[in-house]
Image: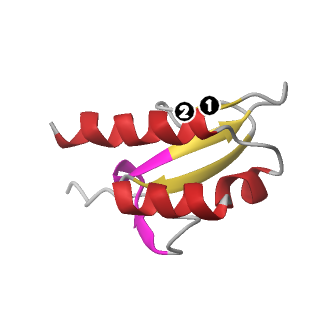
Amino acid sequence: MAGMKKTPLRKCVITNEMKPKRELIRVVRTPDGDVKIDPTSKQSGRGAYISADPEVIQEAKKKSILSRHLKTNVDAELYDLLLAETEGLKK
């Protein structure tokens, strides 16, 4: 008898909603101190999940939430990459 496979849930650091991992984008601060998008969700380092919603990303940019969560400075370019990533997910 094949059982149902559990869907991993993660919490969005902006909205604090628990969502399936596939609906979120992981941003990671590597041990070297670089901050980048982690499409595989397997890179080592401190990670933060953010909803793949342009409004949520704009709010995170305005309030600098990822900088606080990752405990490092996050460039505005990363937020632009996140917005581009959400456009890619919609297509």
Mark 2 surroundings: few (<14), some (14-19) or many (≥20) residues within 10 A: some
Does residue 31 show up?
yes
The residue at 26%/59% (across/down) is: 3
Q: Secondary structure at mark 1?
A: strand
Please, what is the three-letter code of the amino acid marked with disc 2? Asp
| Residue 48 included in the magenta stretch of the image | no
Please, what is the three-letter code of the amino acid marked with disc 1? Lys
Quadrant the C terminus occupies: top left
Determine which quarter of the picture holds residue 14: bottom right
Residue 71: x percent and y percent?
Answer: 83, 51
Q: Are marks 1 and 2 in contact (CB under 8 Å)?
A: yes
Quadrant the N terminus occupies: bottom left
Does residue 6 show up?
no
Q: Nearer the viewer, mark 1 or mark 2?
A: 1
Left or right of 15 in this view: 63: right
The residue at 37%/52% (across/down) is: 52
Left or right of 69 in this view: 60: left
Location of mark 1 (residue)? 36
Location of mark 2 (residue)? 38
Q: Nearer the viewer, residue 66 or 80?
A: 80
Range of residues picked out in magenta: 17-25
